[in-house]
Image (tube, helix red, strand yellow):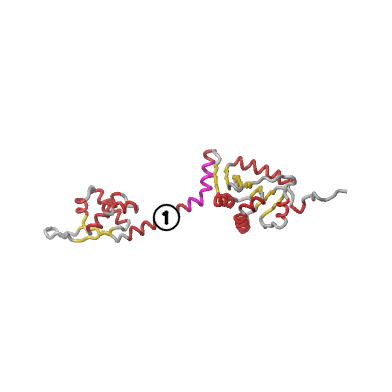
């Protein structure tokens, strides 16, 4: 009658068959279930044990109800528990699945890193839209070291200002240090005059043209964000060699970078 519903609720084929029979017919001994279902004797007893363990049915020793039975030795009768027991079990299973999913997500980065080490292939993940960009930016919170960043702040403020400001506040709380190289533009210079985070060292490379993107280098990863009126795209590449290459290049650029207050005044006149 309700067998398919019980199957969808997580009972296996045999459990659904036996529970459905007990629900339809009430208490009965195992012999009656064997007689009136297609299940074999051994399967019925194993299934009854399973349903008792899950607390979907109850076992109780009672005298046979047939008055013609001479031997009144007590035998096991089985009673269906309230169907609410199945719903409770399903809710517990859903909670366990959610917990397992959260645990997997929390450790996914380490799992991916292990896979990449074994396979020798760079791990590449692709993201789109505001939520995707946020995922790329917030992935830097997995870093245990200083984050190296190239940033086009004008483009950032135009397309993802709120996301970036929330991220910056959270990074400051976590005391996660970052070094940022900005392009040499009037917008960058003006912005850096008031941009001071405790965890951030921001500089400009004189003459460095605007690069219209964001690149972050951290913990064997390099991420890229491209923003425009038509698209918002993010990519995370996890590979030790790619990471080391970009890290070395950044350090070299950093040697030529200057704080905004130390930049030469292009408008000054030389005598």
Question: What residue appears at the point 59 percent right and 51 percent down from the top-left corner?
Answer: 137
User: Image check: 66 left or right of 261?
Assistant: left
Give whichever of 134, 114 is nearer the camera.
Answer: 134
Residue 111 locus on image (x, y percent): 51, 46
Q: Is residue 73 left or right of residue 52?
A: left
Residue 112 painted magenta:
yes
Looking at the image, which residue sits at the far right? 271
Instruction: Please tell me which residue lies in front, 29 or 161.
Output: 161
Q: Main secondary structure of the magenta part?
A: helix
| Number of numbered tags placed on the structure image | 1
Q: What segment carries the magenta color?
A: 102-116
Say above or below: 226 vs 190. above
- 85 or 227, which is in the foreground? 227
Q: Where the N terminus falls, by quadrant?
A: bottom left
Q: Is residue 106 magenta?
A: yes
Residue 18 rendering spot, x and y as whole percentages: 26, 53
Furthest residue toward top: 120
Q: Residues within 10 Å of mark 1 (few under 14, many from 20)?
A: few
87 on left or right of 186: left
Q: Position of residue 217 (x, y in %)?
A: 63, 46
Q: Which residue is mark 1?
A: 96
Which residue is drawn at the image coordinates 64% and 51% (left, top)? 156
Establish if 138 lies above or below 241: below
Image position of 176 (left or right of 262): left
Residue 50: x, y in percent? Answer: 30, 53
Q: Look at the numbered disc 1 and give the secondary structure of its residue.
A: helix
Residue 249 occupies quadrant:
top right
């Amino acid at each position: 009658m309700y067998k398919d519903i019980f199957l969808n609720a997580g009972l296996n084929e045999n459990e659904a068959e036996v529970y459905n029979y007990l629900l339809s017919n009430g208490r009965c001994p195992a012999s009656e279930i064997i007689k009136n279902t297609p299940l074999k004797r051994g399967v019925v007893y194993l299934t009854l044990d399973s349903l008792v363990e899950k607390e979907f049915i109850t076992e109780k020793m009672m005298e046979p109800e047939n008055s013609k039975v001479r031997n009144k030795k007590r035998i096991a009768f089985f009673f269906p528990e309230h169907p609410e027991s199945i719903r409770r079990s399903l809710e517990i299973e859903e909670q366990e699945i959610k917990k397992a999913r959260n645990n997997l997500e929390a450790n996914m980065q380490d799992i991916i890193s292990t896979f990449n080490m074994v396979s020798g292939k760079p791990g590449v993940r692709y993201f789109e839209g505001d939520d995707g960009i946020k995922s790329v930016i917030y992935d830097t919170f997995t870093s245990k070291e200083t984050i190296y960043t190239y940033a086009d702040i004008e483009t950032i403020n135009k397309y993802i200002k709120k996301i970036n400001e929330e991220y910056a506040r959270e990074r400051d709380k976590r005391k996660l240090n970052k070094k940022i190289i900005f392009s040499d533009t009037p917008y960058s210079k003006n912005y850096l005059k008031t941009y001071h985070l405790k965890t951030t060292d921001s500089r400009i490379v004189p003459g460095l043209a605007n690069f219209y993107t964001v690149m972050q280098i951290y913990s064997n990863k390099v991420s890229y964000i491209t923003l425009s009126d038509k698209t918002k795209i993010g990519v995370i590449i996890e590979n030790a060699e790619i990471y080391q290459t970009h890290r070395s290049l950044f350090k070299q650029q950093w040697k030529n970078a200057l704080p905004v207050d130390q930049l030469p005044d292009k408008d000054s006149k030389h005598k």
